[in-house]
Every structure is written in structure tokens, then in C-alpha cells.
Amino acid sequence: MYALNPDHLILRNINGKECIVSIIEVNNLTKYYGKARGIVDVSFNVDEGEIFGFIGPNGAGKSTTIRLFCSLIYPSSGQAKIFGKDVTKFGPEIRQEIGYLPSEVFYYDRMKVLDLLKYSASFYKKDCTQRMHELADIMELDLKRRIDDLSYGNRKKVGIVQGLLHQPKVILLDEPTSGLDPLMQQKFFNLIRAENERGATIFFSSHILGEVQKMCNRVAIIKEGSVIKIEDIKTLQKDNYKKIRIAASNVDENQFDVDGVLNLEKDNGIVRFFYKGDINVIMRKISENEVSDVTIEEPTLEEIFMHYYE
Amino acid sequence: MNIYKHEFKMYSKSVLTWSLALVLMLWVFLSIFSSIAVSAELLNDSLDKFPPELLMAFGMETMDLSSVLGFYSLVFLFCQICLAIQAANYGFSLVSVEERDLTADFLLAKPVGRTKILITKFLAALTGLTITNLVVWISSFLFINLYRDGRPYEIKSLLLLLGSIVLFQLFFLTVGLLVSLLVRKVRSVTPFSMALAFGMYVLSAFGSMLGDDKLEIITPFKHFEPNYIISNAAYDPLALISVAVILFSFAGSYVLYLRRDIHSVV
């Protein structure tokens, strides 16, 4: 993924001045639905060739942001630009090169998969037939079936194929993996990586930290309509707390009160805390006790957010 | 063109059903004309015994069922009700169905502008309505000539009557479209279109019953009342109100649709 190498991002324009190519530019973008908050004053840039994660709990404004990019809704104030052009003014032109996969996929029920994909392809200037069949093969999608007969996961596959068949330069993914089984998720991630290597910029919205960590170069964290942090994924991982739960009889929780431990609590013989730092230090502490159960897991997003708000 | 083809395909079944229903209705009614006409004297007598308010409600107070067009105007009123429901159906569902079925996310994320989408969808619906319209023209001429039993009729009045269908359909199509864009979500199209079509009919019917012409002014059932067209061999000047409503509704729908937010599932 060449986005990690900053040299690729620096182009020289005619004057010899250096500039970074931002494919998506979001400036103070705000959307209210009447009085209800969508997103407030969101600003960030996505560079060419990046896989940019957009992560936050449900209702944080992830879909709102993507829907603004597609002109499904219009901003209350602020601006979003893709390829340097305003998404509201140049919508149809920009969407020629955008692939959008909505979180919930719904298609004309009476159509066959093949007819829907052909209809989808007919909007684009290039011939998409070959790519369409390739994608359907990869995703193991049966083109002859009617859309009403498909399961949720298979509909999702239709969504993936119709969103990628025109080999777009920008791919907008809104919670793309929900409903896909793990095997299909893996194929999907490989597909997205291949698209990225071809040069596509990926905007990946999700509430699952794990998949964003696996895929993305940078992430923006959104909560209650505002972006609270934009960070390199490596930094975020380094920063990451582990959530540790120890069940043991007669355990003294104070022995775990070391550097890097947060929210230490004990009830019913179970000690819980968050830990950041050398994992060996805490493992040794744990093994000093006669434990009956230990779990060490990634904190949920909400728990990470709590950390960001401290 | 791809959207037009796709949309038209979506209408094909409905157009076929409505057209067949109208052919069947025209056929059944017009086929009994010859037997009715014979006993029309008798019928006219018994109609005289009905309360005049009731006859007014059905626009029958000046109706002469023994004449071809007198009888046809009654049948045409039923046609108008059907055409109104069909056109209102298409109007209410034109853009709302995509939002209800959430296919709007698919269509609007494609590289097409909203203007093009609205106009293409509108033309596809209008094509469907025009096919139904043509079917009414053809079957009216066919069945009138088949069953008129040598009785004469004035062709100009019949042409005027059939010619009114286009505006009549456009009224319900555009008003339906406008209303569907004024509400946040159309859950089910049928109650809306029934309410609009029968509401307009009732306004015209009750208006003549109560002798109050204020309410009639807004309803195309009054603007294109079959009796008026046949007895005057001309359109009621009130038809201009229909034209104004059509233009206003279409312009209003256009403005609303261009600015409309397409909401997601949650």
C-alpha cells in the first residue's frame, strides 16, 4: 500500500511547488436533520491511495458523512470535495468515479441479479462486463437468481459487485462486512486491498475496531457527530489499552495498581481493569495468584472513546 | 435512456392490468346500450322519480340515456375514476417508492443528476398513462360503433371528451407527486391515491348536490365533467385551473426533489 510511503503523495505541479494530492477534502462539514444532529463541523482530508478508516459507534454520523459525499443528502453548511470538486455542484461527474456500498443493501426485488448488475453498469461510460463477471466469481455470486430470493449476505455481495464493477477511483464503504460470513469477509478484504493496490482510494466506515486496524492506514474517530481524533493506525494501536478480567479467590486488587492500569475495580472476586504497557509485566502479576479464569481482550470502541474523553 | 427503460418495465404490468380493466368496463357497459336505449323512455321516467340531488351527484340530471353520448358520458365518468386512481398511484409512487424500498440509495449514488432522474421517471409514468389513454380511445370507438345500433352521435363531442383524458391524468400524476414530496415518507401508495381520486370525485359530486360551486373549482371531475363537454361541445373554461395546478405541482415537485434529503434506514 503505497500510501504509507509519503514520497508517493508528493507531486510537483507546474510551478515546481510541492503539493499533496487530497482525493477527499472535508471542510467544516455540518448536517442537521431539522433540529436533530447529523454531523457538526467535520474536517479531514483523505489522500490518494489511502485506506482511510472512519470509526465510531452507531449514530455517530458515519453514514451521514458518506451520504453527503454521494449527494444523497445535502450539507447544512461546510463543504466536501472529491477530486477537488464540490460534491453538491459536480455530483454526477464525481460519481462516475465513485463506488458506494451502503450499509443496508436494497434492490429492485423483481429483478434478477444479472439484470440489476447490467442496469448498474449502464450508468458508467466504460464497459464493465468483464469486471462484473470477475467480481461475481470472486464473491461466489449466482447471477441467475432473483434478488427477492437472496439471503441478506448474498444481497450484500450484490452490493459489493455493483459498487466495484466500474473500477472506481474512490470506494466508499459503509459498514461493509455486516452480514458476510468470516470467509467472505476475508475475500472482501482481499478484494479491497487489490483495488487499493490498483490505485483506488478507500474510505472505510465501521464500528468494528479490529477490521479497521487490519485494513487502514489512518483513522478518524467520530463520536456524537464530531471527529474527535484523526490518527495513524500504528499510533492508535500503540496507544491501545487491553481489557483484563481476572477471576481468582482471595485476590488483592491493589497489587495490580501499577503504571498503565486504569479503572481498577473488584467485585465478587473478579478484578477488572484496563492496561497499557508491557504485557509481560502484567502477566507476571497475574501468575502470582491462584487464578480460575483470565480474559484479555481488546476494549470495545465505547471504552476507547471513554479513554479519549479523559 | 437506461433509467427510462428500467422504469417503464416496472410499470408494464400495472399498465396492462388497468388497460384490461378499462376495456372490460367499456365493453360491458356499452354492450348493454342497445337494450337500455330501447327502454330509455321508461328509464328516463324512473330517473325522474329519483331525488334530484342524487342525480346531480352522478351528473345525471341532464343525462339522456337514450342517446349514444348521453349513455357514454355515464360510462366515461367511471373511466375517469379509474384513470384518476391509476394516475394518482403513479404520481405518489414516482419517487417515493424508491425511498420506501430504499433503492434510492442505489439510483442516486449513480452518476446521474436529480433533474434527469425526475424527468425520466416522469416520462416513463406518462408513457404508461398514455398507453392506457390510447386503449380507452380505441375501445371507446370500437364498442360505440359496435353497439350503437345505428343511432347517431356527434364525433366532435366524443373527440373532445377523450381528448380531456391527458390533462385529467396529468392533474392526478403531478398532484400525487407533489404531495408525496411534501410528506416525509409514503408508507403505502394506495390509501393516498384512493383518497385523492375519490376525494376529488366527492367534491365534484357533493358540490352539485349542495349547489355550492366553491369547492368544485379545484376538482378536475368538475373541470372535465362529461355532461358539460357533451352538451356544449366545448371544454369548461374551468379546465384552465387544472392546467395551472399541473404546472404548479410539477414545478413545485421539481424544486422539492432537487433539495430533498434521502434518509437512510435508521
Image (spheres, rainbow, N blue to C red):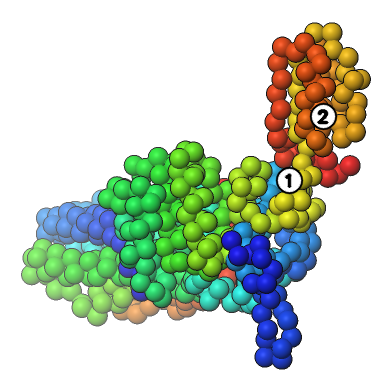
Q: Earlier in the sequence, mark 2 or mark 1?
A: 1
Residue B126 appears in the figure: no
Q: Residue at x 11, y 59 (%)?
A: B34
Provide the residue designation for mark 2: A281
Q: Nearer the viewer, residue A233 or A60?
A: A233
Q: Nearer the viewer, residue A84 or A39?
A: A84
Which amino acid does the dot numbered 2 rest on? Val
> Is B138 placed left or right of A122 in the picture?
left
Q: Is residue B84 above or below residue A36?
A: below
Label 2 with label 1: CB-CB less than 8 Å: no
Task: Name the spot of residue B47 as percent of width and height, x first.
Answer: 28, 53
Q: Crowding near pointer 2: few (<14 within 10 Å), some, many (20+)?
A: few
Q: Nearer the viewer, residue A302 or A283?
A: A283
State the separation of the CA atoms marked 2 and 1. 19 Å
Q: Residue at x 36, y 53 (%)?
A: A136
Quadrant hosting residue A245: top right
Q: Which mark, residue A237? A: 1
Quadrant hosting residue A72: bottom right
Task: Name the spot of residue A138 as percent of width and height, x first.
Answer: 38, 51
Q: Residue at x 73, y 81 (%)?
A: A18
